[in-house]
Image (spheres, rainbow, N blue to C red):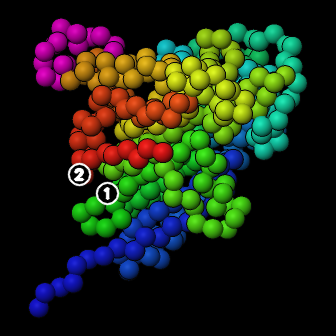
C-alpha cells in the first residue's frame, strides 16, 4: 500500500522587540510541534536578554556599563563579548567602512533616543562639532578573560550588526535541531531548509516606497500587504536589507538617518522619501535599499550597510570584483595572488547584492545568479516591477 507523502506544518510566531518586528518560522512534522513551540519560546527569551544587554537606550544595560568602564578592562557577558568581537572583525574586514564606534555621531545627528520619539520630526539645527571617527582600532579584546577595553570617550553602538549576529546565534543554537527554519529580525534573516520536503523558503523584498507592511498589519489588524519588488529562493544563507527609507528625521529641514558615513561623520547620501527629497537626478543614483546575501546574517547585515555607504554603482562593482577574484583563485588561475588579503577571505565573505534606487530601478550584482545557483536547490530569481 502506497504511503501518503510526508507533509510539514509551519509553526510561526511574531513579536515586536529590539525596536523592530521579529518572527520565527519552523516547518516540522506533526509529532515535533511541541518541541518546535518550546524552541521558539526559548528563542524569544534569549532575544529578550540580548535586547536588555545591548540596547543603547537603557542606562542599566550592559552596553552602558561597558561605556562607563571606558579606560579599564571590563569583563563582559558572552552576549556582549561575542557581538563586540564580530563588530570589530567586520570593521577590520571592511577597512573601517563599517564602524561600530559612531555612537556620538548618531546622537549628534539626533538619534539619541528610541526611534519612535524622533521619527519624521524636525529636531532643529546641529551646531556641535563632530568627534573623529575610527576609534574601533583602539578597542582591545582579551578572549581568555572575556574582557573588553574601551578607550576613553569612545561610544560603542552595536546596532549595525546585533540583529544579524543574533539571528545567526538562534539558528545555530536554539533552532539547531530543526532543519527547516527562518529567523527574521527586522529584515536580517537566516534561512535553512524549506516549508515542505524538497522545497526552499521564498523571500520577498518589499517595496521601499510604501509603508512598512509590518506596521500596516499591526495598525489595521489585517494580514500583511502583499506588495514587493523582488522574490528570491536563496537557499541556506543569511540575508539582510538596509536603508533609510523609513528611519529618517530632520535637522533644520535636512534629512538625517542612522547610516553614518565614517569618512564624514555624518549621515550618508542615500535616498529618503520624496516628501523631503525631490531631486530626480539624486533619486536616480542614490540607493533606497540594499539587500545583501551572504553565508551568515551578520555578514549580510554588514554588507548591506557597506553597500549603502559605498553607493551606486561602485557597490555592485566591488562585490562583482571580489566574486571574480575568488573564482580565479579557486580555478588556480592566479595562484601567485594567494597571499593577497583580498583573495584570501573565506567564502563566507563573498556576497551578492540587490539594490533598489530612489528612482524605483532595481539592479542586481552580476554574480547574483551564480551566487543563488551555488547556495540553492531552486535556481531562480525574478523581479516584480511597480
Rendered view: 122 above or below 220: above
Note whether residue 83 is visible.
Answer: no
* Quarter-of-image position of residue 265: top right
Would you identify the image quadrant in which residue 216 lies? bottom right
- Is 356 left or right of 365, judged from the image as shown? right
Q: Position of residue 212 (x, y in %)?
A: 62, 49
Which residue is pictured at 11% across the width and 91% down the height? 1
- The circle on residue 200 is 1
Given residues 227 and 140, the one toward you in this image is 227
Closest to the observer, 367 or 36 = 367
Q: CA distance from mark 1 to mark 2?
A: 7 Å
Q: Position of residue 345 (x, y in %)?
A: 33, 22
The spot of residue 41 in percent (x, y) is: 57, 66
Specify few, some or many for label 2: CA neighbours under 10 Å numbering under 14, 14-19, or 20 or more: some
Q: Is residue 336 magenta?
A: yes
Considering only vertical position in the picture, is 187 above or below 322? Answer: below
- Rendered residue at 31%/18% (across/down): 321
Which of these two is toward me, 322 or 95?
322
Going by the image, does 196 lie left or right of 269?
Answer: left
Q: Are marks 1 and 2 in contact (CB under 8 Å)?
A: yes
Q: Residue at x 64, y 22 (%)?
A: 279
At label 1, counting other C-alpha atoms closer than 10 Å, the crowd grade (few under 14, some 14-19, many 20 or more) is many
Q: Tell me the element at label 1.
A: loop
Q: Label 2: which residue?
A: 377
User: Please, is residue 291 above or below residue 196 in the view?
Assistant: above
x%, y% of residue 76? 64, 36
Tag 2, which secondary structure? loop
Number of marks present in the image shown: 2
Residue with the most extreme bottom position: 1
**Residue at the image point whose x is 68% and y is 61% from the top:** 218
In this view of the protein, can residue 105 be seen by the observer? yes
Which segment did they paint magenta? Answer: 328-342
Amino acid at each position: 500500500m502506497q504511503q501518503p507523502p510526508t507533509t510539514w506544518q509551519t509553526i510561526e510566531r511574531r513579536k515586536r522587540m529590539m525596536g523592530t518586528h521579529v518572527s520565527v518560522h519552523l516547518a516540522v512534522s506533526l509529532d515535533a510541534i511541541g518541541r518546535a513551540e518550546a524552541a521558539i519560546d526559548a528563542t524569544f527569551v534569549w532575544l529578550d536578554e540580548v535586547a536588555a544587554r545591548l540596547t543603547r537606550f537603557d542606562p542599566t544595560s550592559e552596553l552602558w556599563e561597558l561605556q562607563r568602564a571606558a579606560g579599564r578592562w571590563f569583563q563582559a557577558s558572552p552576549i556582549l563579548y561575542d557581538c563586540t568581537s564580530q563588530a570589530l572583525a567586520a570593521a577590520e574586514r571592511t577597512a573601517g567602512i563599517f564602524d561600530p564606534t559612531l555612537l556620538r555621531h548618531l546622537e549628534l545627528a539626533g538619534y539619541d533616543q528610541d526611534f519612535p520619539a524622533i521619527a519624521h520630526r524636525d529636531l532643529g539645527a546641529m551646531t556641535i562639532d563632530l568627534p573623529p571617527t575610527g576609534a574601533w582600532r583602539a578597542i582591545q579584546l582579551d578572549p581568555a578573560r572575556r574582557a573588553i577595553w574601551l578607550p576613553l570617550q569612545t561610544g560603542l553602538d552595536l546596532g549595525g550588526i546585533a540583529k544579524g549576529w543574533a539571528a545567526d546565534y538562534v539558528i545555530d543554537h536554539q533552532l539547531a535541531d530543526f532543519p527547516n527554519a527562518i529567523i527574521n529580525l527586522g529584515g536580517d534573516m537566516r534561512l535553512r531548509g524549506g516549508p515542505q520536503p524538497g522545497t526552499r523558503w521564498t523571500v520577498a523584498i518589499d517595496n521601499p516606497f510604501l509603508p512598512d507592511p509590518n506596521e500596516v498589519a499591526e495598525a489595521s489588524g489585517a494580514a500583511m500587504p502583499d506588495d514587493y519588488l523582488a522574490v528570491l529562493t536563496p537557499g541556506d544563507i543569511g540575508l539582510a536589507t538596509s536603508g533609510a527609507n523609513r528611519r529618517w528625521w530632520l535637522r533644520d529641514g535636512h534629512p538625517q538617518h542612522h547610516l553614518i558615513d565614517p569618512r564624514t561623520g555624518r549621515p550618508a547620501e542615500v535616498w529618503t522619501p520624496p516628501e523631503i527629497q525631490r531631486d530626480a537626478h539624486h533619486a536616480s543614483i542614490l540607493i533606497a535599499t540594499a539587500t545583501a546575501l551572504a553565508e551568515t546574517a551578520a555578514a549580510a547585515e554588514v554588507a548591506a550597510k557597506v553597500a549603502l555607504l559605498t553607493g551606486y554603482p561602485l557597490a555592485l562593482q566591488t562585490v562583482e570584483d571580489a566574486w571574480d577574484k575568488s573564482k580565479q583563485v579557486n580555478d588556480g588561475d592566479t595562484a601567485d595572488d594567494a597571499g593577497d588579503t583580498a583573495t584570501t577571505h573565506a567564502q563566507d565573505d563573498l556576497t551578492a547584492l540587490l539594490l533598489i534606487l530612489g528612482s524605483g530601478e532595481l539592479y542586481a550584482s552580476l554574480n547574483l545568479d551564480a551566487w543563488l545557483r551555488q547556495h540553492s536547490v531552486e535556481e531562480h530569481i525574478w523581479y516584480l516591477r511597480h
